[in-house]
Amino acid sequence: MLSLARSPRFALGPNSFFRLIVALVRRAPIFLMLLFAGSAIESLAQESPYFVTYDHYLEEPGSLEVEYFSNFATQRGGNDFNAYWLEFEYGTTAWWTTELYLDGQTTFDDSTIFTGFRLENRFRLLKSEHVINPVLYVEYEQISEADKIMKEIEGHDVEADHAVPNAILREGHNHELELKLLLSSTHNGWNFAVNPLATKPLTGGEPWEFGYAAGVSRPLALKASAQRCSFCLENFVAGVEMYGGLGDRYSFGLHETSHYLAPVLAWNLPSSWTLRLSPGFGLNDNSHQFLLRWGLSREFSGFGSMLAGWFRGGR
Amino acid sequence: MRSWKAGASALFGAVVLTVGIGAAQSGEPSMPKFDKSVYAELAKAPVKAAARPNPLESDPEAVVGGAKLFERHCAECHGASADGGKKGPSLRAEEVQHASPGTLFWLLTNGVVRKGMPVWSRLPEPQRWQLVSYIKSLGMPPGTTNH
């Protein structure tokens, strides 16, 4: 990633929040229309609240989850930005989930650009539940240097990387293979997840880069209430996640990279919509001082059957 | 430029392959699909797990809450009345109804991943017991021979 000198200007202020609201309002209707267009299919949802960390639960077989996520960040030495991505998550089998990401970003007073795509697969390694459940995560990404969704922090990623104008950043391209080992455990309603990651740029001979994410979460109520309700405590899952870089092959460690701590909250609605929210806070001078992530998703169960029906011609 | 084209081609191929596999799996004829061997997984429950009693057995709200959870998480595969669906067998079959609560809880927790049943340990334990309560409350369909 690019590394430039930072200016001490602190960008978090009323103006930033105004821009954030404008950006959210501008993007959300498009996504809502897209989801409502397919809302005829019944669905289910019990989603984790994490934005960066993964637990070991995969998408139900044949289900498609369409997700919109947004990442607003303050930027010292440059313009604040709002990055966003669409995720299409499909349960191919009970042990294999595949996802397509389409990334974009708006840097205020600069431009709005598409920044690339990612194709991710997760494979459950053990057939039943254990104290620690490993899942192998393999992702291929083809994104530009202007990608700012911060879905993972790796190597020596720092805030200053994002201070460069889009016109320059978009000229640089990343072809990367990313591997994660998702280790997750659920006990008495608490989920604990740790995700070490390693990334290998496929061009340019750059070294392996490393990073981590870890999270803990729990539903606010463990027992389902008898009545139908949107605001029952069992529909809310709260927790906290921490993520950051671990340097590269030649310079491994917690230094010269960024780290974040972020409370997370998910609201699983009975209608199978899930709303997530997470304010994030940078833990060192290399980090953005403030992030605000939110996401809206809807799960369409039976998507695979519906698709098969189309191909069978209604037989 | 060439790399972007190659990437786009790889992406398209991967999406087609993945959706194709998923569609082929879920597109098999729905009924009748399941014979009695599908219930063989129940016999694999460890003795200790099978012997666990349902702590919500005497809770009158457990069945109601379980019904809500069933509709949300299970009906898509097992059918709205649990008589079996496109992807999951009937839960009102003798094998299920005669299984101990602990056995059903164990199966819910571990799933049968290689055969398409996801693990449901993401639901807290009380909710899994509520599901067990609901499933046991259904009983066998009228006219079914009780062996």
Image (cartoon, rainbow, N blue to C red):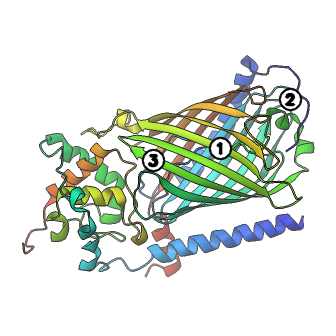
Tell me the residue that label 3 is attached to. A185
Q: Give the number of the mark in front: 3 or 2.
A: 3
**C-alpha span from label 1 to label 2:** 26 Å
- In the drawing, does residue A145 fall left or right of residue B54? right
Q: CB under 8 Å between callouts 1 and 3?
A: no
Q: Which of the numbered marks, if any, corresponds to residue A78?
A: 2
- In the drawing, does residue A257 fall left or right of residue A223? right
Residue at left 38%, top 33%? A220
**C-alpha span from label 3 to label 2:** 40 Å
Q: Nearer the viewer, residue A241 or A291?
A: A241
Residue A112 percent across, percent down from the top left:
81, 42
Decide: few, some or many residues near mark 1? Use Cα within 10 Å; few <14, some 14-19, many ≥20.
Answer: many
Tell me the residue that label 1 is attached to. A212
Do callouts 1 and 2 point to residues on the same chain? Answer: yes
Q: Chain of mark 2?
A: A
Q: CB under 8 Å between callouts 1 and 2?
A: no
Q: Amino acid at mark 1?
A: Tyr
Q: Secondary structure at mark 1?
A: strand
Q: Chain of mark 3?
A: A
- In the drawing, does residue A9 fall left or right of residue A258? right
Residue A29 at least partly seen:
no
Residue at the top extreme, as displayed:
A14
Residue B76 at least partly seen:
yes
Q: Amino acid at mark 3?
A: Ser
Q: Earlier in the sequence, mark 1 or mark 2?
A: 2
Query: Eyeballing the image, is B29 above or below B78?
Result: below
Q: Amino acid at mark 2?
A: Gly
Query: Eyeballing the image, is A92 above or below A268?
Result: below
Decide: few, some or many residues near mark 3? Use Cα within 10 Å; few <14, some 14-19, many ≥20.
Answer: many
Query: Eyeballing the image, is A284 above or below A125?
Result: above
